[in-house]
Image (cartoon, rainbow, N blue to C red):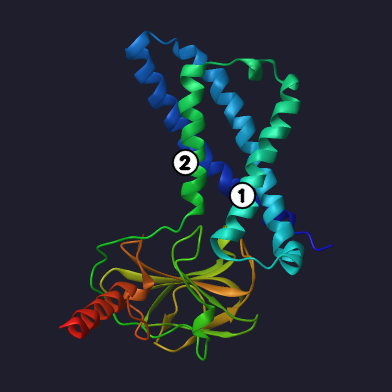
Amino acid sequence: MRCSYSEIGETAIGWWLFFSGNLILAVVTISVLLFFKMGFDLRLAIPILLKWEIFITVFSLIIANVLHLHKYFISRILPVKGFVRITLLYLPSFWFAILIFSYTSFLFPFVRMWNLNLESPLGFVMLFLLFFRMRAQRNINDPKGPKLRLPIEDFNKSKFKPFGVFHPGVDFEKEIGTPVYAVADGKVAVSWPYGMNGNMVKIKHEDKFSTAYTHLNEITVNCGQMVKEGDLIGYTGNTGHSFTPHLHFEVRYRNRVTDPQKYLKEFKLKDEKFKKKKGQKKKSKK
């Protein structure tokens, strides 16, 4: 059985940090609103916060283990992809965490404390955050930028996933060891293992643009090195939080994620295709 405890730990910590940060913000906001509305005792929020932190820890560990099992074992039996895969993995993990938490709550006396006014909106916020992390994240109004070559040659368009579920960017599904090339001239800013991204290369380009290449099996450039468009920077892999061998590619402006399809030479926006089809239909009606 293949088991990478560091990989499981990184995934669990990533989920825990995401939910914990938003939980603290939600508890403070809801508590303050209740305080002005009905004189809510703010001290009640502390045990409720601790209770939810325990639940989040359990949930994060379950998700990390389920994703790890899927990556190496379940995917061979149940080869579902996209939003269906994410739903089948995350929602059962959420309900399983609730089940475990309910049966072990007797270990923590303060967990039995319940305040409907605070916990009802908290439950809604946590479910909303779960669905937010499951859906594709897109940015609009991205600035004009450079025209970039593709990071991988001779790829099958059916294996190209625009803005894969759960994370921004684009995925190029390729077997391990496929060469990855710099999409434009620039300076290497990152060339080492980078948490859930696995082995990662980040290149800074002109006009405050940068590109990131993650889940690499091998990196062939060093930090601070100047690269030209088309230079070899590494090989595709399955490192970090990755379900299948692929290259996750991002284009950033001022370190803000943009839609890579707007900058890749070989791709056209879906909106533009839709407008063309719409225009053709109007002409045919006339």
**Residue drawn at point x = 36 percent, y = 80 percent:** 264
Picture quarter containing residue 218? bottom right
Q: Answer left or right for 267 relative to 76.
A: left
- Seen in the picture, residue 256 relative to 44 is either above or below; the reply is below
Tag 2 secondary structure: helix
- Kindly identify which numbered label has been placed on residue 90: 1
For disc 2, the neighbor class at 10 Å (few under 14, some 14 to 19, many from 20) is few
As displayed, is residue 131 above or below residue 119?
Answer: below
Task: Say if residue 166 shows up in the picture.
Answer: yes
- Type of amino acid at the residue the image marks with label 2: Phe
When the figure is inspected, residue 144 is found, relative to residue 180, above or below; the finding is above
To which residue does mark 2 refer?
Answer: 128
Residue 220 visible in the current orientation: no
Q: Extreme front residue here?
A: 285
Q: In x, y percent, where is residue 265?
A: 34, 85
Amino acid type of the residue that numbered disc 1 sits on in the rendered structure: Tyr
Q: Tell me which numbered mark, 2 or 1, is placed earlier along the sequence.
A: 1
Where is residue 187 shown, x and y percent of the image? 39, 76
> Residue most toward the right?
1
